Image (tube, helix red, strand yellow):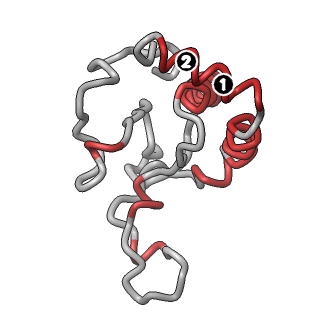
Amino acid sequence: CKDGTVHLTRPIERVGAHAKGFNAHSIGICYEGSLDCRGRPADIRTPAQRATLRQLVGQLQEKFPGCRVCGHRGLSPDLNRNGEIEPEEWIKSCPCFEVAKEFKELEEFAVKTENTEEHRVTQHIKEQKGGK
C-alpha cells in the first residue's frame, strides 16, 4: 500500500501468477500505483513504499541468497538481440523504475555474504533441520 503496509496474498511456497514463464521459479512483489494522474506509466512510489520494498527485497535476498532481482521489464525478450532490453521490447512497462539498478547493492551484498564461511555454516544447519 502507499503507506508502506505489506499484505501477503499467497504463501511464498505457492506458485504465483505474476510473470508468465517465470512463476514457478520466482516470487512476485506488487505495489500500489504505477500510473500518473493521466494514466501513463510513472514511478509514483511513496517514501514509505520505497522503504518497505527495500526491506522486503533485502529479507528475500537473505532467505534466497544469490537470487536475481528484476521487474517485468527485465524479463522481456531482447527482440533485436543487441544485449539490451529497450522500452520498445518491454512486455510490460511496470514497474516504472529500474529494478536491477535500484537493488544492485543489495544483490551484491547477498552474493558476498553467500560466499562467507559463516553463511555456508548457517545454510548447512538449515539443511540439517529440513531447510527451516
Q: Residue at x 45, y 87 (%)?
A: 81
Task: Please state which of residues 87 and 67 is positioned toward the viewer in this rendering.
Answer: 67
Report which residue position mark 2 lands on.
4
Total marks in image: 2
What is the quadrant of the C terminus in the image? top left
Residue 67 vs 54, above or below: the answer is below
Q: Position of residue 99 (x, y in %)?
A: 57, 50
Q: Position of residue 52 (x, y in %)?
A: 60, 22
Does any portion of residue 16 appear in the rendered image? yes
Residue 113, given in percent of the width and then of the height, sits at 74, 34
User: How many C-alpha atoms fall within 10 Å of the one at disc 2: few (<14), some, or many (≥20)?
Assistant: some
Q: Amino acid under label 2?
A: Gly
Residue position marked by numbered label 1 in the rendering: 51
Are the two marked residues, 2 and 1, in contact with CB atoms closer than 8 angstroms? yes
Q: Is residue 67 above or below residue 10?
A: below
Picture quadrant of residue 4:
top right
Asked whether residue 46 is in view, the answer is no
Q: Is residue 46 left or right of residue 6?
A: right
